[in-house]
Image (cartoon, rainbow, N blue to C red):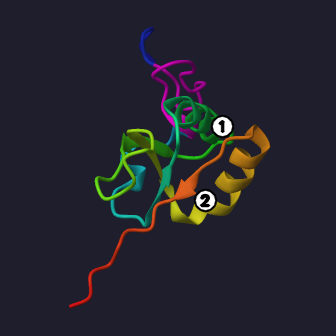
Amino acid sequence: MDAGAQKDDAPAETGAGAQNNDVSAETGAGRETVILLFETTHHAMEAEAAIIDGGFWCDVVPRPPDTMSALCGLAIEVLAGDLGEVRTALGAAGVPFEIYRPEVEAF
């Protein structure tokens, strides 16, 4: 093996910029996701840390435009299948949030 090559079982990168739980940023693509809303940017950042610390994929995204303007401008996208565990992690961290429920227009 080359001196600069990593073994397949090498430890994953840690710290800022590391991929969460060895899951690529594309994890949410093509899978059902849920958007979480927060009152403050501080809550959004605390939530991101709690979700990542819990080992779950998330992505910080802009707040959907059809939500209350009093909410923080950031939202967090999580996999729908992880929602139960994410709720538990955010509850344990004391981070208040709402689940985004888009308005569906009648045809």
Q: Quadrant of the C terminus?
A: bottom left
Instruction: Report how many numbered discs are placed on residues in the image.
Output: 2
- Residue at the far front: name it: 70
Image quadrant where residue 11 sits = top right
Region rendered in magenta: 6-21
Would residue 24 be counted in the magenta stretch?
no
| Residue at position x 44%, y 39% in the image | 72
Amino acid of disc 1: Ala
Single out the mark in the foreground, 2 or 1.
1
Q: Secondary structure at mark 1?
A: helix
* Residue type beneath disc 2: Asp
Name the quadrant containing residue 51.
Answer: top right
Looking at the image, is mark 2 or mark 1 earlier in the sequence?
1
- Residue on which the image places disc 1: 50
| Residue at the image point whose x is 51% and y is 58% from the top | 79
Residue lying furthest bottom:
107
Pointer 2: what residue? 82
By secondary structure, the bulk of the magenta-drawn segment is best described as loop
Along the line of sight, the residue nearer the viewer: 11 or 61: 61
Looking at the image, which residue is at 31% across and 59% down? 66
Disc 2 vs disc 1: Cβ atoms closer than 8 Å? no
Secondary-structure class at tag 2: helix
Per the model, the C-alpha gap separating discs 2 and 1 is 13 Å
Q: Quadrant of the N terminus?
A: top left
Confirm whether the magenta stretch covers residue 18.
yes
Residue 89 percent coordinates (x, y): 72, 46
Vertical arrangement, residue 34 with respect to residue 107, above or below: above
Residue 48 x, y percent position in the rendering:
56, 36
- Residue 43: image x %, image y %? 58, 35
Is disc 1 surrounded by few (<14), some (14 to 19) or many (20+) residues within 10 Å?
A: many
